[in-house]
Amino acid sequence: MPRHPMTSDELRLELHRLQTRLEESELRFRQFADNIDLVLWIGTPDWQKVNYISPAYERIWQRSAESLYTNSMSWLESVVEEDRPALLDTIANQAQGDWQSIVFSPYRIRVPDNGMRWIAASAFPIRDAQGRIEAVAGIAEDISARYQQQQQLEDLAHLDPLTRLPNRVLLADRMQLAMARGRRTGQMLAVCMLDLDGFKPVNDQLGHKAGDDLLIQLAGRLTQTVRADDSVARLGGDEFVLLIGNLNSIGEAEEALNRVLKVINTPFHLGDQHVRVTASIGVTLFPNDGGDADTLLRHADHAMYLAKEGGKNQYHQFNPTLEIRDRENREALERIERALHQGQFVMYYQPIVDCLRGRPTGVEALIRWNHPILGVLSPNEFLPLIEGHDQLALEVGAWAAESAIAQAEAWQQSGHDLSVSINVFPQQFRDLDFSRRIEDMLARHPGLPPGNLTLEIVESSALEDVVSASRMMKEGDRLGVRYALDDFGTGYSSMTYLRRLPVHTLKIDQSFVHDMLTDPEDLAIIEAIIGLAAAFRHRVIAEGVETLDQILMLTELGCPLIQGYAWPVPWRPGRFLSGCAISRPTRAGGSMPRSTCRATISS
């Protein structure tokens, strides 16, 4: 059906209808634009004039929109200076030719309250019917909250939550970058493993909050001590890693580490307490000592443990020879652990003889390794390794104590009233649960009176931690257990320490006994120890006694309790000394004749 031309009235009506629809559309757009948190804008194709900007601009930029209508680029004044070049380059490239759409890299703006906001923005061309660009439109959004959430997630993944230092994950990235820089420049990188000395007592005595405060302060000190290009990371606990790069000599690394040790030695203020700690640091150099991050960290870790063994509060540089020895030690420790779990350890017992009464008063329990190939190994072949490994020392020590207590109970129940002495590892008396463990063992073996159990601590170990040793001995008194200081005379105990340590027995170290008949100084030391024991009303036992003349001299000096190879070598539990009547020595010289000891051996 043919369409008739519209009359003028119809044209006016249609125009009014279209005008109304346009106004309604514009109203809806403005309502939409006014109420969303996006900045919407429209400008000329050359980006030199803004024709429209939504109200969100003033809310986000906290600037008047009027400035944009007079200067279309005034929004850049709020952009952080270092972010501007990338934005201007992108705009310049698009304004010169045909383009589709762009997404700007997120950038930062400063707002009047000195705050910082992150902005995500994009722009696109508006084309006419012929496809020519007649305008440019864009969207900008405040993504600060989203960015902060993303940053928090990245922090959780890469930063230690307590100290805000890089964690192990970020450390790996930092190491790769530092090693790559070293390859380019030919300079060295020092990888340093740092572990605090004496941090555990801070936690134990002042609480974990104080320990955390110390670690936070330490992180700040380390960060301020190293250079801006260096890195400090926390692996966990009180263990940190320092990456010190751009080194031209080992001396430069040593200077940096001396500064680190110095700032750590400065007291830490924890509430109303001033606490001192030190650190042991292991250092290895790239590329000298290894080509990959894991190897460097392992080298630094080994060197750090050598720094601790060497006296602590120092740094130790990695040495390849020591690496080989350390690997051999680790393999030996694994064999020892297997031996413990496979029941290869056994206990031998050496009598402690009262020469005046002519019989043994007790035994010392001595551990041996019944190796399936090498036979019975003496303690010197494996104990030093165990003593350097905390967890293994606790496990072996617990096994030895339980075995000796069970054996002493068996002897007691068979009519042989013998006390038993057990050697205690330093790690055991520092263990806060040690006394409870001994109490549990005695409860499992009620046939052994607690007074028949003596725990021996090496004097030098007790002096290293008098507080722990004293605490343990006092708890032992509560249980009825006795304590002895082993190898006495080698640790230079003072009378003050003896008063603080509630011991019952002093055991004279065999090094003094060995030459007592020919060395006046050794003899004088033995006399002094016997006198000291008498003054404090302690028992005294001489170790390492091998000859009749030594027995005569010790008995004359007032030390009739003897232990050593003057009697048979230590026995297995199936053969023990049930009675020993010793003829009172009347002559000097020579080894003890077998006839002077009449023993009944039970098997």
Image (cartoon, rainbow, N blue to C red):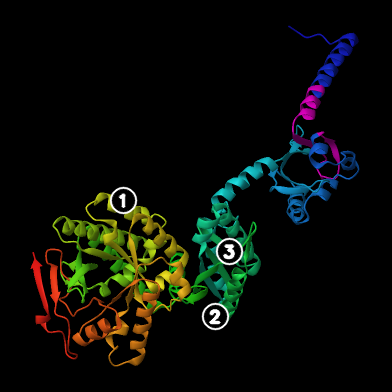
- For this view, does 365 lie left or right of residue 530? left
> Which residue occupies the extreme top position in the image?
1
Q: Residue at x 38, y 63 (%)?
A: 427
Q: Which residues are magenta?
A: 27-55
Q: Residue at x 23, y 76 (%)?
A: 563
**Secondary structure type for disc 1:** helix
Q: Residues within 10 Å of mark 2 (few under 14, many from 20)?
A: few
Residue 46: within the magenta? Answer: yes
Residue 24 vs 429, above or below: the answer is above
Task: Tell me how far mark 1 sits from mark 2, CA to CA.
Answer: 53 Å
Q: Is residue 432 left or right of residue 589?
A: right
Q: Nearer the viewer, mark 1 or mark 3?
A: 1
Left or right relative to 255: residue 32: right
Secondary structure of the residue carrying numbered label 2: helix
Between 328 and 407, the one lying in front of the other is 407
Q: Mark 2 and 3 residues: CB-CB less than 8 Å, in contact?
A: no
Label 1, residues with CA under 10 Å away: few <14, some 14-19, many ≥20: few
- Looking at numbered disc 1 in the image, what kind of residue is underneath it? Asp
Task: Please tell me whether mark 3 sits on a helix, a strand or a loop.
Answer: strand
Quadrant location, the C terminus: bottom left
Residue that label 2 marks? 250
* Amino acid, disc 2: Ile
List x then y, in percent, for residue 184: 56, 73
Q: Mark number for residue 440?
A: 1
Disc 3 marks which amino acid?
Val
Eye-nearest disc, 1 or 2: 1
Mark 2 / mark 3, whichever is N-terminal: 3
| Quadrant of the rendered image containing residue 381 | bottom left
- Residue at position x 29%, y 88% in the image: 516
Instruction: Say which mark, if any, is on residue 232.
Output: 3
Q: Sort mark 3 into few (<14), some (14-19) or many (20+) by Cα contacts within 10 Å.
A: many
